[in-house]
Amino acid sequence: MSQAFRLKQSIEDAVIAGEFQPGDRLDEASLAERFGVSRTPIREALLQLGAEGFIDVRPRRGAIVSVPSPTRLFEMFETMAEIASACGRLAARRLTPENDAAMEAAHRACEMAVREGDSEQYYADNRNFHEAIYRASRNSFLADQAFALHKRLSAYRRIQLRARNRLLQSLQEHAGILEAIRAGDEQLAAMRLHDHVLVQGERFSDMVLGLAGDRRSDAAGSRSGTAK
């Protein structure tokens, strides 16, 4: 994992935790000081975040935090669930030995990450599993849309995998999805993929709502303390 990629993940975590607010400017010099690195890997990390739509890179203003509202975030997960289910349906209809082997390899890698309790490695292997399904749809336009939205939601999906018992549950869901695709059951594959993606959206939206409530409480407490 490159230094820039690790910094990208650290910045994602800080934004999701509310340390940076929508509209905040991400200053390269300040971030370099915060993480004890030079500005070059910070710049690379911000470029990656910009490419994923996680931040906006604006002329003369630099990198600006762009975080969707809880409602918008859930809508994005809901859309991702629909796109993923379409990929699963087509994959069940059009599965080739090559695509089957790619899904199997990614699934086995996920199993290894679960045994080791490595959520970060599982996240990477989980991405490979889903991307193998997108390719198995053999609809390149649909796969491109899935890749783009999956990438846009990557930070939120990665954080969600840290929830208690989520790695094992996710792996079990993968096994069910793979089983349905191999059986050629289009409707079951679509349903299982839809539910697999959407449950992450529901749980993460709950987390975001909780964080928003905490921030409002903190702000109210600060105002109360000032009044005293």
Image (tube, rainbow, N blue to C red):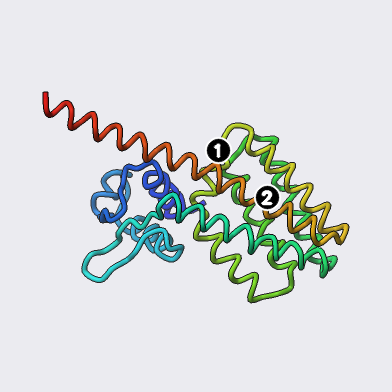
Residue at 71%, 48% (x, y): give it.
109
x and y percent of residue 125 in the render? Answer: 65, 51
Instruction: Note whether 27 is above or below 121 in the view shown.
Output: below
Quarter of the view holding residue 67: bottom left
- Furthest-right residue in this view: 183
Q: On residue 221, which mark appears?
A: none
Distance of label 1 from label 2 (alpha carbons): 19 Å
Q: Which residue is mark 1?
A: 162
x and y percent of residue 11 in the render? Answer: 38, 49
x and y percent of residue 180 in the render? Answer: 82, 54
Residue type at numbered disc 2? Asp
Quarter of the view holding residue 216: top left
Residue at 69%, 37% (x, y): give it.
168
Q: On residue 195, which mark appears?
A: 2
Q: Quadrant of the C terminus?
A: top left
Which of these two is toward me, 206 or 101? 206
Which of these two is toward me, 158 or 44? 158
Residue type at numbered disc 1? Arg
